Image (cartoon, coloured by chain):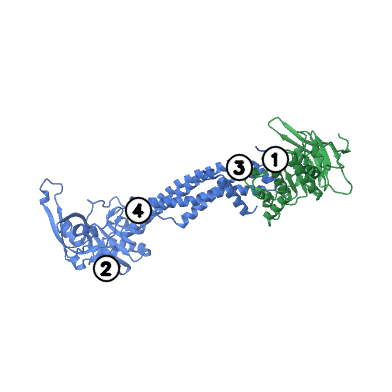
Chain colours: A blue, B green
Amino acid sequence: MKLFDSFRSALQSIIVNKLRSALTMLGVIIGVASVIAMVAVGNGASIQVQQQVLSLGSNLVTVTPGNQNSDTGLRGAGAQSVNLTLDDMNAIEAQLGPTISAVEAEQSAGRWQVTAAGQNWNSQVTGVTTGYPQVRDWALAYGDFFTDDDVRVYAQVAVIGSVTAANLFGDGVDPTGQTIQLRQAFGGGGPAGAASRARIVNFKVVGMLDTKGTTFGFSRDDQILVPTTTAQRVLTGRTNSVSSILVKAASSDQMANTTADVTDVLLQRHKIADPSQADFTVTNQNDTLAALNQVTGTFTILLAAIGGISLLVGGIGIMNIMLVSVNERTREIGIRKAVGARRRDILVQFLIEAIGLTGIGGVLGILLGWGITVVVHQIPAAANIPIAITAGTVAIAVGVSVAIGVVFGLYPAMRAARLHPIQALRYE
Amino acid sequence: MNTYSPAGAAPVIRLRGVTKTYRMGKDNIVQALQGADLDVYPGEFVALMGPSGSGKSTMMNILGCLDVPEAGTYVLAGEQVRELNDDQLAAIRNRHIGFVFQTFNLLPRLNAIENVELPLLYGGNARGRTQRAKDALAAVGLGERMHHRPSELSGGQQQRVAIARALLNDPAIILADEPTGNLDSRSSAEILAIFQSLNDQGKTVVMVTHEPDVAEHCKRIVRMRDGVVSGDELVPRPRRAEDELRLAGQGHSVDLHAGPVATVPLAAPR
């Protein structure tokens, strides 16, 4: 039998039993749709995580105090000692300058109450050095970043985030040149009146950062950047320590080299011979990304497996209905055999019918899955997840549904092909 | 060996000592054929008669390659059927034999043309198959209702569709298993007229019937009893169905029961 005739005949038989065909297909439709939707959401989440990590700055090698690999290492806030300093950063810049893109050192100064133009706000204050815009890939919307001179003289200047600026000065207002007052109560948790014993420092706003949005749920546009030295001397009182040094490698390929170079420089400066005894930790952003990708990948596989189970159930439904169909059409099989159909002709006929059911179901499932992702996108919490239906996903979904047609259609088709013509003709 | 053998021709069908048993349930074994012999020569029109259970339908199924004998030999146009595999049997059913059933056995979902085309889907030259199906339908007098489904056709019309289907690959042998069993007298006469006309054109026809007056339209009557051939006679002047139809056209009802026709025994019954 010609393949075209087989397809026509299969399609006719699917159309004749409209309701049954539709219900049978439903299993495959739901299965394919859930695979498509879940993989799309999983991939989307993975892409989002990647984008967020990279939005912190790309090709970053981060140095933090303390040794994560050693029990003797220093951990946690209380354990932070003076083992990373601005001098470490300067040494990295001096020794690796030509091979790296940029470097900066940060020191968190905690949350401060901010007052300006009669408005009150509360922001995270961080001391950073002049490499910040380059390391973080973050340009300014207004004004200029503070200079190395500002860092040297502990200048009381600040670059503020767009959300902070909007809350203090109003939306779209250029805040440069304005003065802000940072205020922090000390003797924390003290009795009433503690508020009066507050540290108050004035800063001049020299620039405002571009809007970047949120990372892992935190707004990155509500912050105040001051020179690291100012944070150390004026805001926290710690003299020389920094909470992290960030090195931007020249390229993604150079990250492993840069990680090794930075480690060498610091080991040498800290006079540590055994790298396992290092009093600092160097983290490569690529490793972080890989770890996160592994997590999201596992997540995606889990989701796909759930979809796969519904596909399996759909396949069993196909097999069931094909067996019923073969039974019902025993006489037809007998007639076809009587006029000369070979076993193979009957086999192919029923196989194509099963594949037709799963193939059409697969295509409808892809459409439904796509619809689901569109609906998911309307949910505010998921609106930022980039939904990714790739050609590969679609190809796999179609391939899998056709394969299910073959696998679950084969046994019924073989039963049909093996029928004895006389017994089939006599079947009532 | 009580088979008829006209001089100078090779039989197109030769059965020798053919047996077939069916197992119906655990302890119920039916011996449908118990050593049947039969020769059919090209151009014959044979009626196969016998009471129910005599094995005539089993014989037809074996002749039609729908079933294979347990023992004995069946030579069809020089080929040993027992040596053929499933696909080769299917090819013979497709090309060399046209089968007509009592219950028509048309596919209910297909219209007349599609039913007639069916053999061409499985072999033969498929070129222009729709036109050939239409021609075959026209040849059996069903030129107008070609796009109707079986359920929209009368019994006689359905049987004509079945005959057109049997003829499509131009087989040398037509096998008909009680083709008039479900039809009224007039339709029966029409169907018999078609068979007689096909036989006139040189086709070999073997037809099972249990109605003597239907059998009297054939050139030879083979009788079966208890799984063997028990009688074999020639009909020197068979009834002509077209004569009966012509009379009917002149105001008479179709009468298939108009007196017995003389037959000549070929061999003594066992």
Q: Which residue is mark 1?
A: B103
Q: Amino acid at mark 3?
A: Val
Which element is circle 4 on?
loop
Q: Position of residue B108 (x, y in %)?
A: 63, 44
Query: Are dots 4 and 3 on a single chain?
Result: yes
Front position among marks 4 and 2:
4
Q: Position of residue A189 (x, y in %)?
A: 15, 46
- Whether residue A110 appears in this view of the structure is no
Q: CA distance from mark 4 to mark 2?
A: 45 Å
Q: Earlier in the sequence, mark 3 or mark 2?
A: 2
Front position among marks 2 and 1:
1
Q: Which residue is mark 4?
A: A383
**Rendering quarter of residue A172:** bottom left
Q: Which residue is mark 3?
A: A326
**Side (left or right) of A197 relative to B55:** left
- Do labels 2 and 1 touch, CB within 8 Å? no
Query: Are dots 2 and 1 on a single chain?
Result: no
- Do labels 3 and 1 touch, CB within 8 Å? no
- Whether residue A232 appears in this view of the structure is yes
Q: Which residue is mark 2?
A: A94
Q: CA distance from mark 4 to mark 3?
A: 48 Å
Q: CA distance from mark 3 to mark 2?
A: 81 Å
